[in-house]
Amino acid sequence: MRYTLNQECLIHKLAKEKVNELQTLLYGKDVLSDRQRENARKELKQYQELLYQNRLNRQMEMR
């Protein structure tokens, strides 16, 4: 499924916001349980992978 440029920009913006939120949660001064920390790490990794794949897809389309 192809997205318009506006849709792609919105997805990218929302994913970046979520990555920043999760990084703040993980590396901030909040005390998290082991389970919360592990879930946040997994979610952060998934969003970072999404951003990476999105960037690769855009680069491949430009060629």
Image: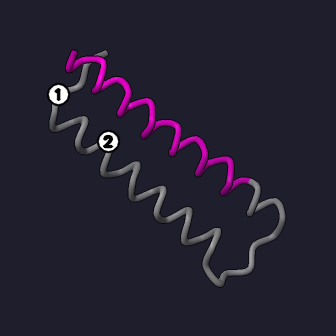
In the rendered image of this protein, does residue 17 appear above or below residue 7? Answer: below
What residue is rendered at 84% in x and 64% in y? 34
Q: Which residue is mark 1?
A: 4
In the rendered view, does 36 fall on the left or right side of 47? Answer: right
- Residue 61 x/y as whole percent: 24, 17
Q: Secondary structure at mark 1?
A: loop
User: Can you name the residue that lies furthest to the bottom here?
Assistant: 29
Toward the viewer: 52 or 6? 52
Q: Residue at x 46, y 63 (%)?
A: 20
Question: Please, what is the three-letter code of the amino acid marked with disc 1?
Answer: Thr
* Relative image position of residue 47 (x, y in whole percent): 51, 44
Q: Is residue 8 above or below residue 19?
A: above
**Type of residue at label 2?**
Ile
Expressed as whole percent of the image width and height from the top left, the position of residue 1 reads 31, 15
Check residue 43 for magenta coloring: yes
Of the image marks 1 and 2, the number of the one nearer the N terminus: 1
The magenta segment: 39-63
Secondary structure mostly seen in magenta is helix
Q: Quadrant of the C terminus?
A: top left
